[in-house]
Amino acid sequence: MYSRSMYDQDERIRKAKTMVAVIKDFLRSELSSLSLLEIGCSTGIIDNYLSEHFGQVVGIDIDEQAIAFANNTFKKDNLACYVDDAMNLKFQDNLFDVVICAQIYEHMPDAAQLMSELYRVLKPGGIAYFAAGNRLDIKEHHYNLPFLSVIPRNLAHLYLRIAGKGEFYYEKHLSYWGLKKLVHQFEIHDYTKKIIENTALFQVDYMLPDGSIKAKTAKFVVNHAYWLCPAYIWLLKKKPRQD
């Protein structure tokens, strides 16, 4: 589904700044020697920003037009974008220090296969920045329709048609508990609460201005009804498989 946000420089750079801030906070070290893969890189705007901080940045997406835009617009020695399938990545095992997987899982026919591939290409001890929407979010952010992701799928298809926003609801969101199960092979480091409680450090104060009703509501939900958070940001650390 085409979205104007794919080409929105300001919006995507804000997201990239949060990614860098979270990864730096976790690793407590320089990022310039690390290799990074972004799954679902779209037009490459985020990857271009990340290439200013990481040693090597690779982006992949199935959208040929978006990848063409990325490669024609951003030309750097340490940046490359390719057309590739996230459920069958062409990269060798244990290749990347960091993988970015932000708001991607719900678009996959098989989210478990996506996570298996993500695990495979990460180096032992490597980390994945995993940003994921919650099925129980009141407003589904792809279509801005209340309760779209909560209701049964056959009703969601009908709801989308009645609203004039599409024929089929393809996205498959998971609840908090479903997301935990999805990433079970990783060691989870949860940054959701940290980000909401220190919005300036993690570059999200534009979205949650200090003292605003929105910021106060977010703090209440994350502390008292965590399972209702609209989205989560977790760092997933690759644990060696047990033979």
Image (cartoon, rainbow, N blue to C red):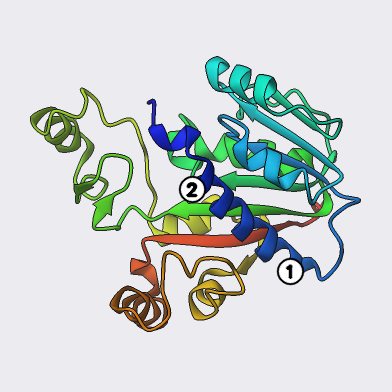
- Amino acid type, callout 2: Glu
In the rendering, which numbered label is found on residue 160?
A: none
Residue 220, percent across and down? Answer: 35, 82
- In 3D space, how far apart are the residues under numbered discs 1 and 2 (Cα atoms)? 23 Å
- Give the camera-side residue of 72 and 198: 72
Query: Of circles 1 and 2, which is in front?
Result: 2
Q: Residue at x 51, y 38 (%)?
A: 111
Residue annotated with mark 2: 11
- Amino acid type, callout 1: Phe
First in sequence: mark 1 vs mark 2:
2
Residue 169, percent across and down? Answer: 27, 31
Disc 1: CA contacts within 10 A as few (<14), some (14-19) or many (>=20): few
- Give the camera-side residue of 184 and 235: 235
- Give the camera-side residue of 212 and 63: 212
Q: Residue at x 47, y 39 (%)?
A: 8
Question: Is residue 83 in view?
Answer: no
Q: Is residue 236 above or below residue 119?
A: below
- Quadrant assignment, res 115: top right
On the rendered structure, is 43 left or right of 163?
A: right
Q: Quadrant where the N terminus lies?
A: top left
Residue 237, percent across and down? Answer: 73, 59
Q: Secondary structure at mark 2?
A: helix
Q: Residue at x 59, y 36 (%)?
A: 114
The furthest residue to the left: 162
Residue annotated with mark 1: 26
Q: Residue at x 42, y 59 (%)?
A: 231
Residue 196, percent across and down? Answer: 48, 74
The furthest residue to the right: 33
Disc 2: CA contacts within 10 A as few (<14), some (14-19) or many (>=20): few
